[in-house]
Image (cartoon, grey):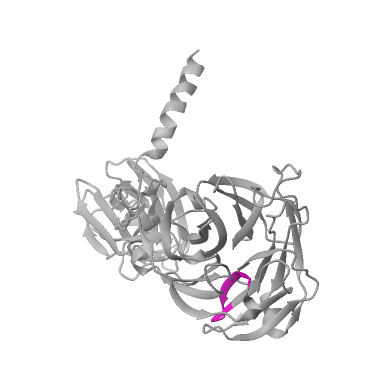
Amino acid sequence: MIKILIILALMLILPFYGAVGQTSGCTDPAATNYDPGATINNGSCLYPPLTLTANLKYNLGSTLVENSGMVFWNDKLWMHNDGGGAAAIYETDTSGTILRTITVSNAVNEDWEDIAQDDTYLYIGDFGNNNTGNRTNLKIYRVLKADVLATNSVMAEIISFSYPEQVLGASTSNSTDYDCEAMVVKNGKIYLFTKQWVSQRTSLYELPATPGSYGALLLFTENVGGLITGADIDVSKNMIVLTGYNAPFLNRFIYLMYDFTTNAFFGANKRKITVSGSRQTESVAFRNEEYIYIANENSFFGPQRVESINLTNVLHPYLSLLPITNIELKARTESGYVHLEWNIEPRQEFWKGELQRKNRTDATYETLFSFNHPTGVYDDHTLAGGENFYYRVKALDRNAIASFGLEQKIRMPGLNKSKISYIAKEIRIQLPSSSASFQIKVVDMMGRMMEKLNTVQKSLSINAANFPRGIYQVNIERNNYLENQYRFFKN
């Protein structure tokens, strides 16, 4: 019975203990419910309605009349057409001129809907499925970027996949939940955002970014209130942008997700923003973290074109908080120890940190204490009296970039030191009252170790009768710091 009660108590206490010092809430200063004290983003941020203007960059020529996917890479825009078009990628400059056409020689454009990238590859999604929703040959073509730069005809590797939840059967056009027109690639995984025609939702699926045949893993379904037609990711800033529209009048929008961790894209900040003008917007690409391109295919509402949207005012509050900007460390001596307090801002960008210490200006800082909260206290009881000590804080942000606070110098008041004497060929040591463990070393002038021991005894003696004639030094250390030193001559 006692064991059961102990287990139940631990089950109640441990979750609370793990959450001590961590505050969940909205961490985005742009949100209406921003909580400056929150350190964990729980996805609760709410935003006021917003409409952004899409600015025309250029109209596209007839070659890209049904452009459907786009990425920005190597200072160029790379696009492709929708199903039935050539199995080709078009390299264009940012004024709309097609510079090259790269044919994927072993591919067919059954229904190409999006293109994504990582550092090494381009990924072309042949996964459009809006006709009856019954396609079983869904695939993604993976092409080496080096090949794309080197030649105008490339071979692709093939990633085949299916949706394990899908039940095949006759259905009418534009009524399936298993259509897809948007994907991104992150950390060796492909992430698909489906276009659910009836519910106006999107499901997030994951599959490996390596050739093979897979069942896509369903991660989450989000009510985005529209049809998702394109996606892009800024991996370095933890941001994804989706684009889409509402049928039948093609009222378009972008859907921003940012401040996420791992693949929990819908678990952090989510913001749907209206985009001015009705267009059949089919693709989106980050030029940088504050500027995106969107591309529209030809429709009743207008010709094929590329537009830009400036996100500076939307994302600035978030992006401006990315670096660690302030590390404050306070240190004061108490009776026999040093009390330390730290505060790191902005809190929502902090990942983990270290309290570091050294005992000489020319020494290397060593980790004294590791922590995972941007504020905290620590009492250092491992010090010797009469010594200088130097402290600083090392903080890592969420991109694992290190920042260091200003050094704090502390001199510990003199404490009762150990007493050392050499009498009748015997080293006699009286240690101060302390719960600490002491290390005693006896060395000759050549640095050879004659005696070494660890002890918590208050008094002890070492027999030096068998030591050769010469000069010896006794070092007493406490927690790797020199507490006392004594020299004697043995004749």
| In this rendering, position of residue 212 left or right of residue 301 | right
| Residue 467: x %, y % from top left | 45, 57
| In this rendering, position of residue 84 left or right of residue 80 | right
| Residue 90: x %, y % from top left | 65, 79
389 and 74: which one is in front?
74
432 up-or-down from 314: above or below: above
| In this rendering, position of residue 231 left or right of residue 347 | right
Specify the quadrant that holds the C terminus. Answer: bottom left
**Quarter-wise, where is residue 13 in the image?**
top left
| Residue 257: x %, y % from top left | 46, 56
x 33%, y 54%: residue: 347
**Quarter-wise, where is residue 300 in the image?**
bottom right
340 and 484: which one is in front?
340
356 and 194: which one is in front?
194
| In this rendering, position of residue 342 left or right of residue 80 | left
x 69%, y 59%: residue: 127
| Residue 84: x %, y % from top left | 73, 68
Residue 319 seen anywhere in this rendered image of the structure: no
Q: Which residue ends up furthest to the front in the rendered image?
A: 300
- From the image, give the main secondary structure of the stretch colored magenta: strand
398 up-or-down from 303: above or below: above
Please give the count of numbered marks on the rendered protein. Answer: 0
**Quarter-wise, where is residue 289 in the image?**
bottom left
Asked if residue 326 lies in the magenta stretch, the reply is no
299 and 67: which one is in front?
299
Residue 193 seen anywhere in this rendered image of the structure: yes
280 up-or-down from 76: above or below: above
- Magenta stretch bounds: 66-77
Asked if residue 68 lies in the magenta stretch, the reply is yes
Q: Which residue ends up furthest to the top in the rendered image?
A: 1
x 35%, y 52%: residue: 47
